Amino acid sequence: MESVELVALGESLRDRYGDRVDLPAFVAGLDLDGLIGLTVGDLVSYVARQTAA
């Protein structure tokens, strides 16, 4: 995923879920291997955890 696409996804998630989902902070917390191996399932799990509360 290109960085521009990642920014657009982050904005879309913030529009939908507000401050509960902070994709840039999530991605910033990943090491290089985590970033390279990031899957759609990882993102779904993150969003689900953040919105469950």
Image (tube, rainbow, N blue to C red):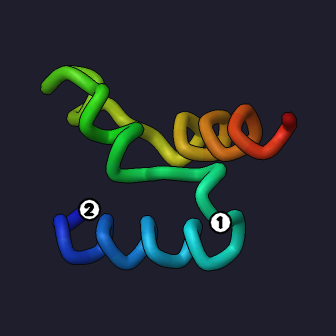
Helix or strand or loop: what does disc 1 sit on? Answer: helix
Q: Position of residue 19 (x, y in %)?
A: 59, 58
- Mark 1 or mark 2, which is nearer to you? 1
Q: Is residue 41 left or right of residue 4?
A: right
What amino acid is at disc 1? Gly
* Residue 3 against residue 37 in the figure, above or below: below
Residue nearest the viewer, comparing 22 with 8:
22
Query: At 61% across and 37% down in the image, what residue appears?
Result: 46
Residue designated by label 2? 1
Count of marks placed on residues: 2
Q: Secondary structure at mark 2?
A: loop
Q: At 78% from the left edge and 45% from the top edge, which residue is drawn?
A: 51
Q: Is residue 25 left or right of residue 21?
A: left
Q: CA distance from mark 1 to mark 2?
A: 22 Å
Query: Of the residues shown, which amino acid type is indicated by label 2?
Result: Met
Residue 27 picture location, percent across and down: 32, 40
Q: Residues within 10 Å of mark 2 (few under 14, many from 20)?
A: few
Task: Please identify the quadrant where the N terminus is shown.
Answer: bottom left
Residue at (73%, 32%) from the top-left corner?
Answer: 49
Q: Quadrant of residue 12?
A: bottom right
* Contact (Cβ within 8 Å) of mark 1 with mark 2: no
Residue 26: which quarter of the image? top left
Question: Considering only order in the chain, which callout, 2 or 1, is on the residue closer to the N terminus?
Answer: 2
Q: Which residue is mark 1?
A: 18
Q: Is residue 4 left or right of residue 24?
A: left
